[in-house]
Image (spheres, grey):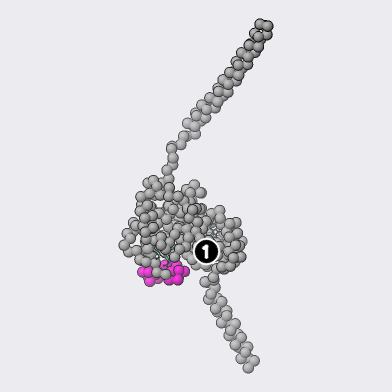
Amino acid sequence: MKIFDYLLFILLFFLLCISESSSGQSKELPSDKASINKGRELFLNNCNVCHAISIEKIGPALSSIPKRRPLSWLLSFIKNSQSMIAAGDTHAVFIFKSYNNTVMPSFKKLSDDDIYDVLAYIQAASKTGVSKDLYPEALLSGSYGEAALHGKFLFEQQCAVCHAFDKEVIGPALGSTPKTRPISWLIPFVHNSQELIKKGDPYANFISEQYDHYKMPAFTYLSEKDIRDIFLYLNAKTSGPIHISGSNAALNPDLSPMPKLKVDPGPPRMSFEEGSHYRRFISLNLMQGLFLLGALIHIAFIIAMAFGFFKLINK
Ligand code: HEC
Ligand code: HEC
């Protein structure tokens, strides 16, 4: 009897171990206030210089990233993205290239739990969104405008019920998607995501699972150009200001057959030599002006003296 109890204990112990290890991959993110607050603190101290939830800064917008990448992938990417890139991880290499080979520092000092907290904060913040932060429609004007405006129209009509750029609605935020997924994947996915899922595409299956197998409708009636235009629009709407490190200035290279984002450079600038002519002119004028003013004050003073002198003699 005693031995039987003992065996039962061992059996239970093994069962526990097995269930523990099989749940290792899909560890749930913490959802309590304390973890989220700690994650926010860590995010502000370590990530905020380069990332926001809803807009692109130096790196991509991270909205709903915990649902767009496997946790195990996120964990190793955040700890050391460069080693993943060196090892040839497809997505890591793609996104590194999309950001003009900008190196994200490694965060080996963060523990697994720290990273889970950061991700928990990101996921919590992904629900709210901060549309007012987004870059203005001005980006949509100019030479780039027409295709992107067409994309805006299509997005609002076809996608906005379920998607926003900056927050999770029914589907994930799409703000940084144009740079985090290749267009060669985006076109078939938007055309018919279910078909891609059935074909066994790993990413399509992963994301579908994250959204409880919700079936995004097929958009077979949208042309390839329509779909490109939508992502052109999303890219314009969420890209950071052009001057930040130059790393996020370029459009997704995959979208290159489309007109490129051209920023109005403003009136032509003067060369340094031309400028020095003006600088000399200005400084000379200033000196001359001061001399003139000095001279006038002197003359006024002399006249006043002369008046006083004459008054004195006339007495
Ligand atoms: C110095 C800038 C910088 C800092 C700081 C930084 N990142 Fe990044 N991050 C990037 C860049 C740039 C990329 C794009 C990929 C690349 O270039 O390697 C990126 C990519 C990512 C990705 C992949 C996104 C995707 O769509 O697949 C995640 C996740 C990420 N960063 C999380 C973080 C977290 C969490 C922190 C803070 C602990 C952080 N990053 C700090 C620059 C930075
Ligand atoms: C009825 C809701 C619904 C509509 C409408 C919809 N989607 Fe989705 N979309 C989803 C859901 C849910 C997902 C998550 C994946 C899944 O369940 O297949 C998703 C995922 C995506 C993804 C993958 C994002 C990523 O970063 O991994 C893209 C891209 C996308 N949708 C683009 C579009 C575009 C473009 C349109 C409009 C032409 C659109 N969707 C319309 C619900 C929708």
Which portion, as a residue range, is magenta?
194-213
| Residue 256 shown left or right of residue 6 in the figure | left
Q: Amino acid at mark 1?
A: Gln
For residue 14, above or below residue 198: below
Quarter of the image where one finds residue 204? bottom left
- Asked whether residue 108 is in view, the answer is no
**Which residue appears at 32% of the width and 59% of the height?**
223
Q: Could you say where residue 99 lies in the image, as x and y percent from the top left?
A: 47, 54
Under circle 1, the secondary element is helix
Where does residue 265 sit, x and y in percent of width and height?
44, 42
- Residue 219 lies in the magenta-colored region: no
Q: Quadrant of residue 183 in the image?
A: bottom left
- Above or below 311: residue 242: below
In the image, residue 286 sits, relative to residue 149, either above or below, namely above
Main SS class of the magenta portion in the image? helix
User: Residue at horizontal 33%, vertical 59%?
Assistant: 224
Measuring from the top left, give residue 282's x and y in whole percent: 52, 27
Whether ligand 1 has any atom under 8 Å from the Cβ at mark 1 is answered as: no
Q: What residue is drawn where x is 38% and y is 52%?
A: 148
Q: Residue at x 56, y 55 (%)?
A: 48
The residue tagged 1 is 123
The N terminus lies in quadrant: bottom right
